[in-house]
Amino acid sequence: AQKVTQAQTEISVVEKEDVTLDCVYETRDTTYYLFWYKQPPSGELVFLIRRNSFDEQNEISGRYSWNFQKSTSSFNFTITASQVVDSAVYFCALSVYGNNRLAFGKGNQVVVIP
Amino acid sequence: DTGVSQDPRHKITKRGQNVTFRCDPISEHNRLYWYRQTLGQGPEFLTYFQNEAQLEKSRLLSDRFSAERPKGSFSTLEIQRTEQGDSAMYLCASSFTSRIPNEQFFGPGTRLTVL
């Protein structure tokens, strides 16, 4: 079974500060995929990034970056120079090869204060 | 609009009534998923279809729940004899078929309130 833990519930930052969201996952599969989704107040989940278990290279995409460490089963996500529009709930999710179901964490509520 | 659409957006019903929700996926997508999200929680997988075939059902999907995708296009999710515990947001998503999990595109959801 797959499990995703997002320990932080609500995080408040002042605009332009960086915010890092922690995600810890559990799976017995050796091939798996990690995702981050954003759920703004409108409610519609929006895909942000996907990473596979064979690629631990950390990347930056615009104001988003992620830190994937298999040794600690963590897939942390950072928003740089936060903006008010970043206020949303962010979900980390896990899926394994051959099975498309997503296992989501409980989410992190991010509040960006202007 | 070419995204995933769901109807209705909101549904209020009395306990014991039956309700049906509809999901229209992105037209090129073979796979369609249903999730349920309660307040303060992440979405939980219910079931998914590849074309018209229902390939997997979660243990969360009790006998009162049934989902169909008759022509491999839109899908319906029916809940019979609703209970207050069924109150949640029901999310539909679609994706291309692949052994590698692709990104799933989500609809706006149907919020169900059972009184």
Image: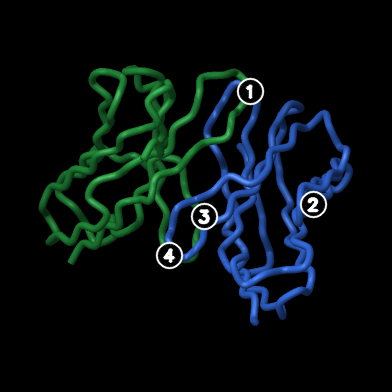
Chain colours: A blue, B green
Residue B62 in the image: state x and y as whole percent: 30, 40
Q: For the residue labelled by badge 1, is the local secondary structure a helix, a strand or a loop?
A: loop
Residue B39 is tagged as 4
Residue A65 is tagged as 2
Marks 3 and 2 sit apart, C-alpha to C-alpha, by: 22 Å
Q: Name which residue lies at 78% across and 74% down.
A: A17
Q: For the residue labelled by badge 3, is the local secondary structure a helix, a strand or a loop?
A: loop
Disc 2 vs disc 4: which is toward the camera? 2
Q: Quadrant of residue B55?
A: top left
Q: Are marks 3 and 2 in contact (CB under 8 Å)?
A: no
Marks 3 and 1 sit apart, C-alpha to C-alpha, by: 22 Å
Which quadrant would the N terminus of chain A be assigned to in this image?
Answer: top right
Disc 4 residue type (three-letter) = Leu
Discs 3 and 2 share one subunit:
no
Q: Tag 3: Cα neighbours inside 10 Å, few (<14), some, or many (≥20)? A: many
Residue B109 in the image: state x and y as whole percent: 35, 50
On the image, numbered disc 3 is attached to which residue? B42
Marks 3 and 4 sit apart, C-alpha to C-alpha, by: 8 Å
Discs 3 and 1 share one subunit:
yes
Q: Tag 1: Cα neighbours inside 10 Å, few (<14), some, or many (≥20)? A: some
Discs 1 and 4 share one subunit:
yes
Q: Is residue B33 above or below residue A67?
A: above
Marks 2 and 1 sit apart, C-alpha to C-alpha, by: 22 Å
On the image, numbered disc 1 is attached to which residue? B100
Compared across the picture, whether B37 is left or right of A57 comes to left
Q: Judge by depth and name the residue closer to the eye, A13 or A52.
A: A13
Disc 3 vs disc 2: which is toward the camera? 2
Marks 2 and 4 sit apart, C-alpha to C-alpha, by: 28 Å
Q: Name which residue lies at 48% across and 38% down.
A: B105
Discs 2 and 4 share one subunit:
no
Marks 1 and 4 sit apart, C-alpha to C-alpha, by: 30 Å
